[in-house]
Amino acid sequence: MYISRKHELVFLPIPKNASRTIGKLFKDHLQGDTENTLHHQIVPPPGDIKHYTPFVIVRNPYSRVVSKWWGTLTVLMKKFNLQDVDRQTRRKSFKAYIQQLKPGDWGTEYNTINLATQASIVDRAQYYFSNPIRVLKLENLDNEWSALANDLGLGRLLLKKKKIGNGSHEYGRRQNYYRHPWMSRKVHDCFREDFKRFEYSRQIE
């Protein structure tokens, strides 16, 4: 959780959704009035920030699952001192990951293969704030961040980031991962609420 007391702004990180990018923004541009509390855990924030403006970043569930899988695979690669794995091995690994996938709980999911639904994270975090949580989409982050910064009178704060959503693990379009219909159905069933609430298409695009 990143807190800017000067601008009364709170960023609530959701795993695999550009948390480091926004954290860097807080450090680089709001330095001196930020706090980094327990990361990726729901904890009661200080009472004096209840009226601050909280925001989160959400992401297409299909891409979020790919990102989580890649992070899990990377840990295994490091464990066995592997620089990379071939395409066939990646495909088999992703297929096995989807077979085991199920929604997790926020705060424990980093130790598992699972991910909490983004909607559940927003709902649980909202309890601690009097203002509605602002939701920004990762796929349109530059524009939506600019709109939020403008609303708060922050001026033009640019995001200095690498190309999000098309990183080293995403060698091509989502079709390259979800090669069988049952795989996308499994993700949709696990994250149905995210698709609906945040208006993401069920189609693999």
Image (spheres, helix red, strand yellow):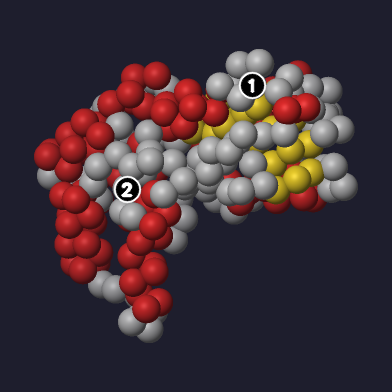
Q: Please tell me whether mark 2 sits on a helix, a strand or a loop.
A: loop
**Quarter holding the N terminus?**
top right
Residue located at (21% from left, 31% from top): 189
Q: Mark 1 and mark 2: span between their CA atoms?
A: 27 Å
Q: Does the residue at mark 1 contact the one at mark 2 (Cβ under 8 Å)?
A: no
State the image coordinates of residue 186 (x, y, percent, origin top left).
18, 38
**Quarter holding the C terminus?**
top left
Q: Nearer the viewer, residue 45 or 174?
A: 45
Disc 1: which residue: 129
| Residue 107 seen in the current view | yes
Q: Nearer the viewer, residue 89 or 98?
A: 98
- Does 129 sit left or right of 163 as displayed? right
Disc 2: which residue: 114
Q: Please tell me whether mark 1 sits on a helix, a strand or a loop.
A: loop
**Residue 94's image quarter?**
bottom left
Picture layout, residue 197 above or below residue 10: above
- The amino acid on which the numbered mark 2 sits, given as a three-letter code, is Asn
Name the front one of labels 1 and 2. 1
State the image coordinates of residue 27 (x, y, percent, origin top left).
77, 50
- The amino acid on which the numbered mark 1 sits, given as a three-letter code, is Phe
**Residue 44's image quarter?**
top right
State the image coordinates of residue 65 (x, y, percent, origin top left).
34, 46
- Does 175 sit left or right of 24 as displayed? left
- Does 1 sit left or right of 101 as displayed? right
